Image: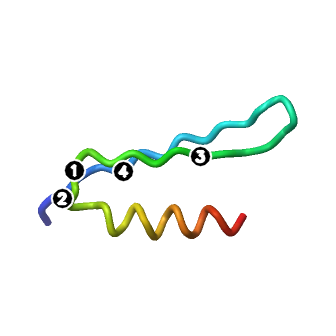
Amino acid sequence: MEKLGTITVSVFKNAENVTDFCIETDNDNVLPVSYVIEDTLKLY
């Protein structure tokens, strides 16, 4: 297998216990996968 890139998901919680996340990619090759992850996390 050939590595296409890396996706990093950071999860945050503020003082009101509201959870948010940030998704970062190291290149455009993995953007479609990062969009799927982002859409899935928005459901929760």
- Residue 38, given in percent of the width and then of the height, sits at 52, 62
**Image position of 14 with respect to 34: above or below:** above
Q: Residue 8 is drawn in which quadrant?
A: top left
The reply to whether discs 2 and 3 touch (Cβ–Cβ < 8 Å) is no
Residue in the image at 27% along x and 61% along y: 30
Say few, some or many: other residues with alpha carbon within 10 Å of mark 4 (under 14 / 14 to 19 / 20 or more). Answer: some
**Image position of 27 with respect to 40: above or below:** above
Q: Is residue 21 left or right of residue 18?
A: left
Work out how far the residue at label 4 is from the one at label 1, CA to CA, in angstroms. Answer: 9 Å
Give the mark nearest the N terminus, 1 or 2.
2
* Residue of label 1: 27
Give the mark nearest the N terminus, 3 or 4.
4
Work out how far the residue at label 3 is from the one at label 4, CA to CA, in angstroms. Answer: 13 Å
Which disc number belongs to residue 7?
4
- Residue 3, given in percent of the width and then of the height, sits at 17, 57
**Which of the two residues, 5 or 38, is positioned nearer the viewer here?**
38
* Residue of label 2: 4
Work out how far the residue at label 2 is from the one at label 3, CA to CA, in angstroms. Answer: 22 Å
The reply to whether discs 1 and 2 touch (Cβ–Cβ < 8 Å) is yes
**Three-letter amino acid code of the residue under disc 4:** Ile
> Mark 2, mark 3: which one is toward the viewer?
3
Residue in the image at 64% along x and 63% along y: 42
Give the mark nearest the N terminus, 4 or 1.
4
Which disc number belongs to residue 21?
3
The quadrant the C terminus occupies is bottom right
**Three-letter amino acid code of the residue under disc 1:** Asn
